[in-house]
Image: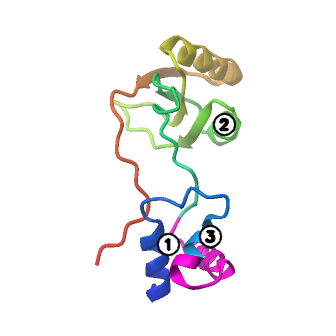
Amino acid sequence: MKLDNLDRQIIQATQTGFPLNSKPYHVIAEQLNVTPQEIMLRFQRMLEMGIIRRIGAIPNHYKLGFTANGMSVWNVSDEVVDEYGKKIGELPFVSHCYRRPRHLPIWHFNLFAMVHGKTRKEVEEKIEQIALLLGENDLDHQILYSTKILKKTGLRLID
């Protein structure tokens, strides 16, 4: 699918983030002189076509006071990794959880879950909750703590 001029304008208007407003689609629509419904329809079409994967908030955890962020990596049997990945992803302290391929013999972890906390002790306590949830399915795990903030960006147009 090709993007038309309005699609490009919508992406350009939102590529640095949505307006911080209770009705962001209305703000974008006003800027582009179209209806909010047209903006929502265009986003839905771009989602369905795979042009964009999702629309969501990207919080700055550091500004929110969560400075001890740890990516927990888990070695979970391939037979149950999807089942437990869903359960872990639903935990309130996990911002994202996903499966990745192993790279044996160097890297045997196949499940990743980002855990946020204000202290390392808090993160470790939360990761212990994940270990308890996994039980005998926790074949091994580690915590990889964040050392810097990476620039987070969404879809960008390159002309």
- Residue 83 has which mark? none
Q: Earlier in the sequence, mark 3 or mark 2?
A: 3
Q: Residues within 10 Å of mark 1 (few under 14, many from 20)?
A: some
- Asked if disc 2 and disc 1 are in contact, CB closer than 8 Å, the reply is no
Query: Circle 1 sits in a helix, a strand or a loop, which is it?
Result: loop
Q: Nearer the viewer, residue 146 or 79?
A: 146
Q: Main secondary structure of the magenta part?
A: helix
Left or right: 85, with 18 as reference point: right
- Residue 25 has which mark? 3
Left or right: 70, with 39 as reference point: left
Q: Is residue 18 above or below residue 33?
A: above
Q: CA distance from mark 3 to mark 2?
A: 40 Å
Q: Position of residue 8 (x, y in %)?
A: 43, 80
Residue of label 2:
80
Queried whether the magenta region covers residue 106, the answer comes back as no
Instruction: Note whether residue 1 is visible.
Output: no
Q: Amino acid at mark 3?
A: Tyr
Q: Amino acid at mark 1?
A: Ile
Residue of label 1:
51
Q: Nearer the viewer, residue 31 or 84?
A: 31
Where's the C terminus, which quadrant?
bottom left
Q: CA distance from mark 1 to mark 3?
A: 18 Å
Q: Which residues are magenta?
A: 30-52
Q: Mark 3, mark 2: which one is toward the viewer?
A: 3
Q: Residue at x 38, y 31 (%)?
A: 107
Q: CA distance from mark 2 to mark 1?
A: 31 Å
Q: Residues within 10 Å of mark 2 (few under 14, many from 20)?
A: few
Q: Residue at x 56, y 21 (%)?
A: 139
Q: Residues within 10 Å of mark 3 (few under 14, many from 20)?
A: many
Instruction: Note whether residue 27 is visible.
Output: yes
